[in-house]
Image (tube, grey):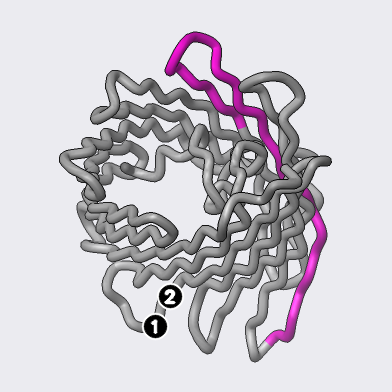
């Protein structure tokens, strides 16, 4: 769906808008993998987990991107809480580490967070910001940790059709606009498509949602660099009665 995920509410909200974990009522774990532009040397992998309690939902995120000569790692600890009915906030503290064998390691600490709210029936808005205080514009290795802001909405037209739209602004780049559509054709299968700008991006995918396991397959196409396949799987334990 062109990564229009700022309003979504599952364990993978840890990667985009931590307010989304406030609405889950099952302890969940997930893994994700991406082969950037079908290049075996450029991989993005991740592990996420979230546990809902009476005081809110706690989550942890581990991510890795790159190859032997260049690698980025991210460790995040998150908390999401519903402040009112269908209104939630979330925050995540991150440790970012970049490793270049010829130059060593460089680590920094920052944070990110967001909000989600249902402003009309079936109409959700979400906003998220990463590294809002620009903890590090550029370090001794030339690594830049920018500030990124996302704002979007999703609308459930029916039990079968979900439309999402989002604007993403990286303070080093032009704003990107994204649109995504999820069509629940039959239980347990959903088909998805998306388009985005800056750069022009087309995406499509399929989701298979079983009782406790969810599988998602997707691919995006960059007009110059080609295809990027993506896979994620999550497992949802029985509902936590202490939520």
Q: Residue 54 lies in magenta, yes or no?
A: no
**In this rendering, is residue 53 above or below 7?**
below
Secondary structure mostly seen in magenta is strand
Residue, far left: 185
Task: Name the side, left or right, on which 235 lies relative to 180.
Answer: right
Q: Quadrant of residue 55?
A: top right
Task: Name the side, left or right, on which 16 lies relative to 213.
Answer: right
Which residue is at 45% across, 16% downward? 123
Residue, far front: 241
Which residue is at 49% across, 21% downward? 124
Residue 225's disc is none
> From the image, which quarter does the N terminus lie in?
top left
**In this rendering, is residue 85 above or below 199?**
above
Stretch of the chain drawn in magenta? 103-127
Which residue is at 33% across, 43% downward? 2
Marks 2 and 1 close (CB-CB < 8 Å): yes
Residue 210 location in percent, x, y? 34, 56
Number of marks = 2
**Residue highlighted by disc 1:** 41
* Residue closest to the eye, 217 or 211: 211
Mark 2 or 1: in front is 2
**Residue highlighted by disc 2:** 43
Residue 47 location in percent, x, y? 57, 68
Q: Mark 2: which secondary structure?
A: strand
Which residue is at 52% across, 72% downward? 65
> From the image, which quarter does the C terminus lie in?
top right
Q: Is residue 238 visible?
A: yes
Residue 113 location in percent, x, y? 71, 39
**In this rendering, is residue 215 above or below 22?**
below
Q: Mark 1: which secondary structure?
A: loop
Distance from the alpha carbon under mark 2 to that under mark 1: 6 Å
* Residue closest to the eye, 199 or 28: 28
């Amino acid at each position: 769906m062109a990564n229009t995920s700022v309003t979504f509410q599952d364990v993978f909200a840890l990667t985009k808008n931590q307010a989304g974990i406030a609405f889950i009522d099952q302890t969940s774990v997930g893994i994700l993998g991406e082969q950037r532009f079908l290049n075996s040397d450029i991989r993005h992998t991740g592990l996420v987990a979230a546990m809902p309690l009476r005081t809110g939902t706690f989550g942890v995120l581990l991510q890795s991107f790159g190859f032997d000569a260049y690698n980025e790692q991210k460790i995040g600890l998150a908390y999401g809480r519903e402040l009112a009915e269908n209104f939630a906030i979330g925050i995540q503290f991150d440790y970012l580490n970049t490793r270049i064998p010829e130059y060593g390691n460089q680590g920094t600490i920052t944070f990110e967070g967001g909000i989600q709210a249902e402003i009309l029936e079936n109409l959700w808005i979400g906003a998220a910001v990463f590294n809002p205080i620009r903890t590090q514009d550029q370090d001794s290795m030339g690594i830049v940790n920018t500030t990124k802001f996302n704002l979007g909405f999703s609308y459930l037209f029916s039990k079968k059709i979900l439309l999402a739209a989002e604007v993403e602004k990286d303070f080093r780049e032009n704003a990107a606009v994204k649109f995504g559509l999820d069509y629940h054709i039959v239980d347990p299968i959903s088909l998805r498509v998306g388009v985005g700008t800056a750069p022009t991006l087309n995406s499509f995918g399929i989701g298979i949602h079983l009782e406790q396991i969810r599988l998602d397959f997707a691919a995006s196409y960059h007009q110059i660099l080609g295809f990027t396949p993506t896979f994620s799987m999550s497992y949802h334990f029985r509902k936590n009665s202490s939520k």
